[in-house]
Image: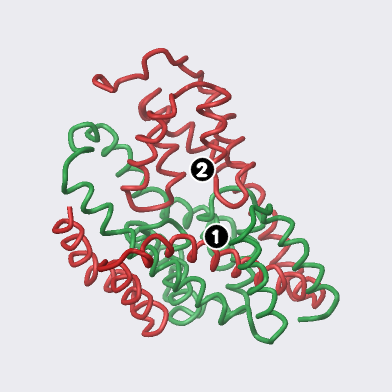
Chain colours: A green, B red
């Protein structure tokens, strides 16, 4: 963390956005590594809290970067982080959209897309692992995680109900 | 879609309408905005047919970064160039950014209160569970197929990022060529 955390965050998130195959959830472990372990911007617990808040908020998961930015450098930090995280990929999307018809059926396009699926699976699994280590600090939290995973896997319950139930259990002092 | 400039029979949305539609998608989208994007754009507004939607979404998935963000840019640019892309993106990101900024202010002020900490601890545990369910759903088709290299790549990516804690770009650049190459050979 040198003179300007804003510049550091702008460069970092702009670079990270290009490797976020599978969306923001695939980039969680890398954000955690840098924000908690390398730059010491926040504690493990604070990072987990920010993930929870971003999941509670409506809208794309990528807004977690605004929470990180706000924590480090206030409103300017939030603005810089979300712009850096979306700018490069949006520009790329705009450019590729013009030429998509030319290569949408190309074999290499399908190979790239198919090849990236297992990578994003591994990355999202890594997110779940990193967050479980931060969140499941006792048996009860672990049980909530396991129960939520089972309900979400086998049913189509609205996640907000699961958050509400887990929040009440947390409030009642189980955790 | 032979000429892709504009969808054939669709109505061209005005910028205000475009903004509101993506704001609606964004604010409804707990646990994934895709079903809402389809509902609003295909079923309610009829700005795209289901096939056009799927094709545009395939493009958004092909690109790095959040799929829904990419989708808004591609969709907006198709109807209104740079301005259309900016309007759709602003609709998608603006309202949730306002909400999340308010939450961020509250968290920085009250995050140390024990009660709030306990509630958030419960929600984090549940959010982690949701992510595990997403992983399980994604993994099923890949792991159930025989003689398939995908699980190996997925497990290596997991070990590199979660256990070894190597930087994501290194893990990505090491594994992506193999994974894409294997997908190419299987074609």
Picture residue at 58% right of the left edge, 62% below the top: A153
Name the one closer to the observer, A175 or B73: A175
**Can you give x and y, in whole percent of width and height, for residue B92 in the image?**
54, 40
The answer to whether residue A52 is above or below residue A133 is above
Picture residue at 46% right of the left edge, 82% below the top: A37
**Can you give x and y, in whole percent of width and height, for residue A107 in the image?**
16, 46
Q: Chain of mark 1?
A: A
Picture residue at 57% right of the left edge, 78% below the top: A132
Image quadrant holding the N terminus of chain B, namely top left
Do discs 1 and 2 share a chain?
no
The answer to whether residue B22 is above or below residue A65 is above
SS at mark 1? helix
Q: Is residue B13 left or right of residue A56?
A: left
The residue sitting at the front extreme is B146
Q: Residues within 10 Å of mark 1 (few under 14, many from 20)?
A: many
Name the one closer to the observer, A37 or A2: A37
Name the one closer to the observer, B183 or A134: B183
The answer to whether residue B103 is above or below residue B14 is below
**Can you give x and y, in whole percent of width and height, for residue A89 in the image?**
35, 48
Q: Name the quadrant containing residue A29.
A: bottom left
Q: Which residue is mark 1?
A: A64
Q: Which residue is mark 2?
A: B34
Q: Residues within 10 Å of mark 2 (few under 14, many from 20)?
A: some
């Amino acid at each position: 963390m040198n003179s300007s955390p804003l510049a550091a965050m702008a460069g970092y998130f702009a670079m990270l956005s290009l490797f976020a195959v599978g969306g923001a959830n695939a980039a969680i472990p890398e954000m955690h590594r840098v924000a908690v372990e390398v730059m010491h911007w926040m504690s493990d617990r604070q990072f987990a809290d920010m993930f929870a808040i971003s999941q509670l908020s409506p809208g794309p998961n990528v807004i977690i970067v605004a929470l990180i930015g706000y924590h480090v450098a206030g409103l300017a930090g939030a603005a810089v982080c979300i712009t850096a995280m979306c700018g490069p990929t949006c520009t790329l999307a705009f450019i590729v959209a013009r030429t998509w018809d030319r290569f949408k059926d190309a074999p290499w396009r399908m190979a790239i897309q198919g090849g990236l699926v297992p990578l994003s699976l591994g990355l999202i699994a890594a997110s779940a692992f990193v967050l479980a280590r931060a969140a499941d600090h006792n048996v009860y939290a672990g049980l909530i995680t396991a129960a939520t995973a089972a309900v979400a896997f086998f049913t189509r319950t609205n996640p907000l109900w699961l958050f509400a139930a887990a929040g009440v259990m947390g409030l009642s002092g189980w955790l | 879609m032979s000429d892709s400039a504009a969808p054939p029979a669709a109505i061209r949305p005005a910028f205000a309408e475009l903004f509101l539609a993506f704001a609606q998608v964004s604010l409804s989208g707990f646990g994934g905005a895709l079903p809402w994007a389809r509902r609003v754009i295909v079923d309610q507004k009829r700005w795209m047919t289901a096939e056009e939607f799927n094709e545009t979404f395939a493009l958004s998935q092909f690109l790095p970064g959040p799929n829904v963000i990419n989708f808004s840019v591609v969709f907006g640019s198709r109807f209104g160039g740079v301005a259309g892309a900016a309007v759709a993106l602003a609709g998608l990101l603006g309202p949730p950014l306002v909400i999340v900024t308010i939450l961020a202010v509250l968290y920085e002020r009250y995050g140390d209160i024990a009660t709030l900490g306990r509630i958030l601890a419960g929600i984090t545990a549940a959010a982690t569970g949701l992510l595990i369910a997403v992983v399980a759903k994604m993994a099923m088709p890949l792991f159930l197929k025989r003689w398939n290299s995908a699980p190996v790549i997925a497990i290596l990516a997991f070990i590199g990022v979660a256990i070894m804690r190597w930087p994501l770009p290194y893990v990505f650049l090491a594994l992506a060529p193999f994974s894409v190459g294997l997908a190419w050979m299987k074609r």
